[in-house]
Amino acid sequence: MQVLAKFGYAYAAFLLFASLVGAGNLVWCFPALLLLLTAGVCLKRLRNHTLYWCVLSAAVLALASFFLYTLFVYRPVAELDGKTAELRASVEDITDWGSYKSYELSVSDVDGTPVRPFGVLLYSWNDDGGITYGDRITVRASLSLNEPAEGTVLSDYYKSHGLFLSTDTVEQTVVEPGAAYNLVSAVRGFRDVLIDALYDAMPADRADVVSGMLLGGTTNLDDAQKVTFSRAGVNHLFSVSGLHLSVVVQLLMVLLSFFRIGKRGSAVAGIVAVLGFMALSGFTASVMRSGIMMLLLLFGLLVRRHSSGLNSLGLACLFLSLSNPYIMYDVGFLLSVSATLGILLFQGPLHWRLCRRLDITSRLGKELASLFTVSVSAVAGTLPVTVLAFEEVSLVGLVLNPVVNAFVTIVMLFGFVTAFLGFIPLLAPAAMVSGAVCSWAVNAIARGAELAVKLPFAYIPVGGRSVKIGFLVVLVITGVCCLFRRRRKKLLLTVVPVSLLFVVLMAGANRYVTDHSLTVTTVCTGDSSAVLIESGGVNIVYGTDDTSTGTALRRLLMGKGIRAVDLYIQPGTGRRPNRVTERLNAIVPVRRLALDVQNIVTRSVTASVPEEDMLPLTDISLEYPDGTELRVIGVEDPVLEITRNGRRVLVALDVKSTLEVQGGSALDLTVAQTATCNPGRSAAKEVLLLTPTEENDPGDERIAAVYQSYTTVRRFPDWEAAGA
């Protein structure tokens, strides 16, 4: 492997480390780097060690670039959070969500002062049909900092794409038409036409999946579909990979072969096709990674040189990491790189050993074995990213992926054919035929994923911090054991089962504590919060109407392995349905829904919850088989009274709530946070209930509602006291 490729891998690894620890904590890393630099200069053994200096220089450059980018690019933009400013920007992309549109703006001027370009998301519920790609737009808007799209550090789509701010409150808008011809606008307009051709040739729900598989992204999928594909272990289908570009290049090669064009001419045409596909896909990080590797392969054919996969991947990582220090926040890029690296490192040895052990000699048998080993290698490569970025790890994906890959090829082939045939009106009938084949293949993949996730142990939750650490420790120990060549097999056979048993015991201990105690977990984003109450297997959710908090709440439930919510208390008295409740119920079924009477009468509630399972907030008193008793008191700011094992705990969402209880005495309920939540870091918090008793009783009685609970969101406000 070339030195430049090694430098690329090291640079990407330290950039990932910087993304995990945050720019504020990198100050403590620079003295360690200085110490390593001194050791390299003083020790003769390290002075001429090429790999040592390669890794050390990559570490210094990666940490410094991340720190400086945060200091001089991100923080000045973040200071606009909560302010109203006049922005002058150009329209880069438009997404139609049905009831509203979102515009990606590249801002070049703030309040008349030129700035370094940064991204802003503008949400509009009005009919802005006059705005198109490339237009110059001047708006005066109230800005807010974007929360992580999925509630975790490694799933911050907005930050990885430079979309630091968003707004949906615009006071005035001035639109200036862009240039008569804009190449970027033309490419994105052509992309929209191809996507429309897919929707004309097949049902809308299937076209949603096909468009995501062809061009990458899960924008058009609903939450239930996203979770199903993730639990089935096939969510990588929506990240553009070498498979996509291989289908594009192979289709072009077949067409060019009819005209008897040689390999060099076909390589040049393939380079043009790859660049065009990258433009259609929006030059996302995963597209760029696979595109660079394919371009290096085609360039090798052009100059008659062999291209190494490991070298190509290292160079792609280096190029993309240098161009965007925040690229490690893009989980699609991480999955793409880790899956490719796993295939390059493990697929060859696994395939050779499998064919040798099973005595596979036929060509068909080797192809089938290759499908299985590629799947296992990709899953092994993506396992660290999956554990860190997601709350669940799929086990059924090992078996499902080899089967799905055959259908994926059909979807890619007929999907591209359908899109381009549908672009020509005279060929619309042919597009309908190819669209029917493509729709059949997509239906097979979707049904297979739905059936697979229903199997026992199809996926396991890894939301607990101890479980995540345990998994990572197992991976590190396994990697260290692989370095010992002589005793590798014995070490792996001993260490791996013991380590896995340790992880299982840790998860079991966490589950036992949860089932035999009363645990209150707070989830907060910005000024909104939600609460999960676990009492002996009974799960109660004090809900929210904030989308970001709802996403974090959903991830918390998934990470804890909670399959159903016994009681969900929906806040608010509005007439519109609560979208957060609907999205949660699609993934984690809600058995009983408590809400205001007005919502039940007007039927402005979640359609998927039967009316007989809806309870008015005015009168709720439930008893569960394990002895847990629950009362809900109040409507506008309801308070929960939970009695378990003779102990009574009162939980309120607002900072301070006064209740009239039996006997006429008043209880002032305050929930205090014993640890400050620092922005940019997840924090452990102990939630205590302070219940001042009657005046003649001395002191305050403190009831510990939870020993420690970990939040799953990344950014918190500084709390002195907050509702739980």
Image (cartoon, grey):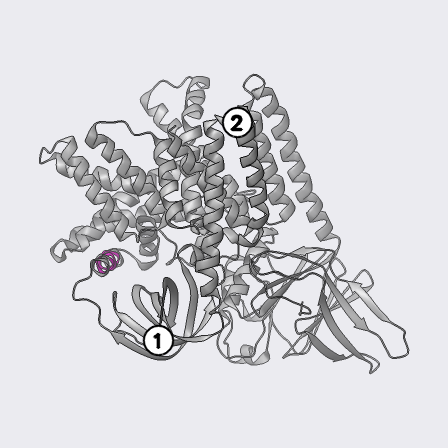
Residue shown at 34% from the left, 77% from the top: 126
Q: Nearer the viewer, residue 389 or 651?
A: 389
Residue under label 1, please give it: 139
Of the 4 image quadrants, the one containing the C terminus is bottom right
- Taking 586 as reference, is 406 left or right? left
Question: Which mark is in front, 1 or 2?
Answer: 2
Q: Nearer the viewer, residue 84 or 585?
A: 84
* Residue 138 is inside the magenta segment: no
Residue shown at 35% from the left, 75% from the top: 139
Q: Residue 187, percent across and down?
A: 22, 56
Q: Is residue 136 above or below residue 401?
A: below
Residue shown at 38% from the left, 32% from the top: 310
Quadrant location of residue 171?
A: bottom left
Residue under label 2, please give it: 46
Residue 482 seen anywhere in this rendered image of the structure: yes
Q: Residue 641, percent across and down?
A: 74, 70
The amino acid sitting under disc 1 is Val
| Magenta highlight range | 188-195
Tell me which label, 1 or 2, sits earlier in the chain. Answer: 2
Q: Nearer the viewer, residue 84 or 363?
A: 84
The amino acid sitting under disc 2 is Leu
Element at label 2: helix
Q: Nearer the viewer, residue 141 or 576?
A: 141
- Taking 684 as reference, is 218 left or right? left
Residue shown at 51% from the left, 47% from the top: 18
Element at label 1: strand
Q: Is residue 285 above or below residue 57?
A: below
- Taking 510 as reference, is 340 left or right? left
Q: Residue 662, percent across and down?
A: 81, 79
The Cα–Cα distance between marks 1 and 2, rounded to whole angstroms, is: 57 Å
